[in-house]
């Protein structure tokens, strides 16, 4: 069977359209995902858990935040399989619809006072659906934008998925600022529900945006020539297990994000520090605003100097900066918290956050790219999700041992650093040759179908 030397050219304007769809879709998807984080830190301990024990209620609420991350590896296995068999577009539409519906349902849930222990059970169920959706969202959007991008600008175009994620986090924070400022009785009765109800727009807008996308040239070529893998996971684990493990280790850098956005928020507004809730939400909002500009700049730099050095700056730098940021919170100095929060999350962490979509995606060939990214990242992200719960436990009975939490976060940055050091540099490899190396078996009848 003859195989073309290169994939068919993308239709004019498709790289920008794919990147825009990835940005908007990810922003809407992660608006849903991150409003849960804010609510878990500020609202849910009072609404869904036993108010007589505030410390335990907060711990349980933060644990429900991590439940979605536990569900994500399962979702990655399912969505990765179908994404590499059916294409990127179908998965992108499905994940967005699922996230919109599950988030809307959270806003409709009865409280503990109304139905007792059934309330947190229903909350966890909806959170699991959110996790399954998120498992396929970034992998499919990253694959779509990477495979549509010009080879010399894959880092830049693929970074739109993550800048969209930051946009969604910014939107979630901005929506919660006026909600958090409501009088306590209104906040706990109906106010917290409004951001979740607004997610119904996700399903409508996301469908309109993503249904017009064309499938990527490389996936179309793969399906028309060698065929798609019948069992992408079998091919992935047979030929690319080392890269999957490398992505798992590298994805632990996401712990910086969860500690920053959830645990640090809960710590700063606790009795131990006593900072204003709305003021701390503004720290997150401005840090995300800076990240929107920093992510494409770091990604563009990676197109010139390589993925590895930029990722290393983000991973190692975040380990150091989390000590500075959590120390600033312990002082109660709002200007200091604002400056160090922006530097830590908006600038330094953005180096790793902006480059990982291309860095991870370029480790795999087309036929297992979505599976490889989904499985590898979601296992790592599962650990990152529960990092918040672990942080709440190691922070001591009063929840104020920030040094232990900073050290814990820095330790979670070590595997990403080692993963980047041992990875191949791929920024100059042609798109159709990504994932090729000696020892990789050719497609066979057991794993490939036309």
Image (cartoon, rainbow, N blue to C red):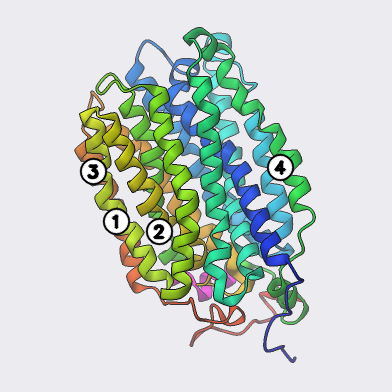
Q: Position of residue 39 (x, y in %)?
A: 49, 26
* Other residues around mark 2 within 10 Å, as few (<14) / some (14–19) / many (≥20): many
For mark 4, what is the residue?
97
Residue 351: which disc?
2
Q: CA distance from mark 3 to mark 2?
A: 18 Å
In this picture, residue 360 sits left or right of residue 223? left
Q: Earlier in the sequence, mark 3 or mark 1?
A: 1
Q: Alpha-carbon distance for marks 3 and 1?
A: 11 Å
Q: CA distance from mark 2 to mark 1?
A: 9 Å
Placement of 448 over or under 327, stated as above or below? below
Measured as percent of width and height from the top left, residue 274 is found at 29, 20
Q: Secondary structure at mark 4?
A: helix
Farthest residue, direction bottom: 2
Between the residue at mark 2 and the residue at mark 4, the CA separation in whole angstroms equals: 30 Å
Q: Does residue 143 appear to the left or right of 70 in the view shown?
A: right
| Residue 324 numbered tag | 3
Of circles 3 and 4, which is in front?
Answer: 3
Q: Earlier in the sequence, mark 2 or mark 1?
A: 1
Where are the magenta residues, as a range? Answer: 234-243
Q: Residues within 10 Å of mark 4 (few under 14, many from 20)?
A: many
Viewer-proximal residue among 21 and 56: 21
Given residues 173 and 358, the one toward you in this image is 173
Q: Which residue is mark 1?
A: 317
Q: Please say if the residues under marks 2 and 4 sit with CB atoms less than 8 Å apart.
A: no
Which residue occupies 36% across, 40% down?
A: 259
């Amino acid at each position: 069977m003859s195989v073309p030397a290169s994939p068919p050219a993308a239709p004019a304007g498709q790289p920008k359209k794919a990147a825009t769809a990835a940005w908007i879709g990810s922003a809407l998807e992660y608006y849903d995902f991150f409003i849960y984080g804010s609510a878990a830190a500020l609202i849910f301990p009072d609404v869904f858990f036993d108010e007589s024990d505030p410390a335990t209620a907060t711990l349980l609420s933060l644990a429900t935040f991590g439940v979605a991350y536990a569900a994500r590896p399962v979702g990655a296995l399912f969505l990765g399989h179908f994404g590499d068999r059916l294409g990127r577009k179908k998965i992108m539409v499905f994940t967005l619809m699922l996230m919109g519906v599950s988030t809307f349902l959270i806003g409709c849930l009865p409280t503990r006072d109304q139905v007792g222990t059934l309330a947190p059970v229903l909350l966890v169920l909806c959170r699991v659906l959110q996790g399954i959706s998120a498992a396929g969202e970034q992998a499919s959007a990253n694959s779509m934008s990477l495979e549509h991008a010009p080879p010399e600008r894959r880092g830049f175009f693929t970074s739109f998925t993550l800048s969209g994620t930051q946009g969604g986090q910014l939107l979630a924070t901005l929506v919660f600022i006026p909600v958090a400022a409501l009088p306590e009785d209104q906040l706990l009765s109906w106010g917290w529900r409004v951001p979740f109800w607004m997610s119904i727009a996700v399903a409508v807008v996301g469908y309109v945006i993503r249904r017009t996308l064309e499938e990527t040239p490389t996936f179309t070529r793969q399906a028309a020539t060698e065929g798609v893998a019948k069992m992408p996971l079998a091919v992935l684990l047979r030929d690319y297990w080392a890269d999957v493990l490398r992505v798992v280790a590298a994805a632990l850098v996401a712990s910086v994000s969860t500690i920053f956005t959830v645990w640090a928020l809960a710590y700063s507004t606790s009795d131990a520090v006593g900072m204003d809730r709305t003021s701390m939400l503004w720290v997150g909002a401005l840090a995300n605003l800076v990240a929107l500009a920093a992510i494409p700049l770091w990604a563009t730099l990676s197109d010139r100097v390589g993925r590895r050095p930029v990722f290393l700056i983000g991973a190692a730098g975040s380990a150091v900066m989390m000590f500075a940021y959590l120390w600033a919170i312990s002082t109660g100095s709002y200007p200091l918290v604002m400056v160090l929060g922006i530097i830590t999350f908006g600038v330094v962490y953005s180096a790793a956050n902006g480059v990982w979509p291309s860095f991870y995606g370029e480790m795999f060939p087309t036929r297992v790219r979505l599976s490889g990214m989904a499985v590898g990242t979601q296992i790592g992200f599962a650990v990152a999700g529960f990092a918040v719960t672990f942080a709440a436990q190691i922070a001591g009975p009063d929840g104020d041992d920030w040094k232990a939490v900073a050290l814990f976060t820095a330790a979670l940055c070590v595997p990403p650093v080692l993963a980047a050091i041992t990875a191949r540099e791929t920024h100059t490899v042609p798109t159709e040759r990504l994932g090729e190396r000696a020892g990789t078996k050719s497609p066979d009848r057991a794993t490939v179908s036309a």
